[in-house]
Image: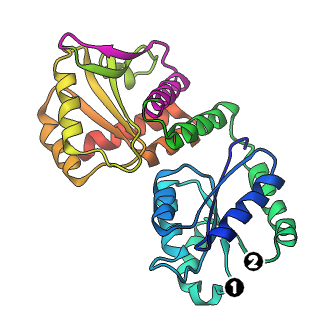
Amino acid sequence: MGVKKILVVDDEQMQAKALAGVIEKNIVGADVFYASDEEEIKDRIRNSFYNLLVLDIRMDHYETNGIALAKEAISNNPFTKIIFVSRFLSEYLADISPLMRDGRILAFSEKEPYDEWIKKLKPIIDDYYASADEQSQAADALVSYYAEAKNETDAYKKGERFEHFVAMLFANIGYKEILSRVKDAALNEVDLIVRNDIEDLFLSKLGKYFFVECKNKPEHRTDKNDIIVFGDKLSRSNGMAEFGFIFTTSTITRNSIVQLAKMDTEEYKIIIVDNVAIMDLIQAQDMKECLKKLIDQQVHRY
């Protein structure tokens, strides 16, 4: 795996910063960042992309602990592996066991002087990334670009990068004509328009074009109003687009699900592709089949 995005979390800032620096220095190609403040930790866990989390299990300074953070990390980054750091594993065995059974935990490690500690961490981390080499180069590139888009701080670049990433996803599925930032007759801007020219019996029945909305706001869930506005764009397409996709680096609110159910009688259909679904697509052996499964699930769900 060429993409090595590592997040180090510790409630002691000096320790988090030092460990992140040692890992980055010794792991070739690693992009390592850290968090130590409680709010910063929560923000990084929820909204950043990483595929390895080095996590202090016991945080005496805060109300939360590493177990709760690990569960949230897995929810937001389904393919993330975790290295737990602690001398107090016995206190958390009951909570750790389910994570172990699911294969989420890569290793346990105790704090040591950094020059000695990295000697033990380096082979674990190197082996982890080496063992993931079965990913195709295309999937690896998509993971990298998704990480860059999601972690971008510039507001304009954040939207632009994510739109480019989603376009790359559709291109990898097999779509050839993908237009960006298109305005309809009412001057409503559509992030992407995908011509449904793929040779597939199931997908060919979904209309001439797909409208695609891209929401790169990891800290904000897609809400009811986003659904309504996008639905209005689809309704103004004069039948050109019967299917629309909202890609979001976050999730959707309960109100959004209710709104989607209310719109079920409309002539168009909106499919939500959230952070978890995006990672499923990237990692899928067959992206086209994964997309079809996602559509099938939501057509029958809402």
Instruction: Find out whether the residues at labels 1 and 2 contact each other: C-beta distance under 8 Å.
Output: yes
Q: Callout 1: helix, strand or loop?
A: loop
Q: Is residue 208 visible?
A: no
Above or below, 59 relative to 211: below
Q: CA distance from mark 1 to mark 2?
A: 8 Å
Q: Quadrant of residue 249?
A: top left
Q: Which color mode does the image show?
A: rainbow
Where does residue 156 sit, x and y in percent of width and height?
Answer: 43, 30
Q: Earlier in the sequence, mark 1 or mark 2?
A: 1
Disc 1 marks which amino acid? Arg
**Left or right relative to 14: residue 228:** left
Mark 1 lies on residue: 87
Residue drawn at 52 percent across, 39 percent down: 152
Horizontal arrangement in the rendering, residue 53 relative to residue 25 (left or right): left
Q: Quadrant of the C terminus?
A: top left
Q: Residue at x 46, y 34 (%)?
A: 158
Q: How many marks?
A: 2
Farthest bottom residue in view: 91
Q: Vertical placement of 156 versus 120: above or below?
A: above
What span is colored magenta in the figure?
157-186
Q: State the quadrant of the N terminus.
A: top right
Question: Which residue was labeled with disc 2?
Answer: 111
Front residue (pair 275, 284): 275
Residue 26 showing in the rendered view:
yes
Q: Residue at x 60, y 77 (%)?
A: 57
Q: Alpha-carbon neighbours of circle 1 within 10 Å: few (<14), some, or many (≥20)?
A: some
**Residue 292 location in percent, x, y?**
41, 34
The amino acid on which the numbered mark 2 sits, given as a three-letter code, is Lys
Q: From the viewer's perspective, tell me whether residue 75 is left or right of residue 97.
A: left
Q: Secondary structure at mark 2?
A: loop
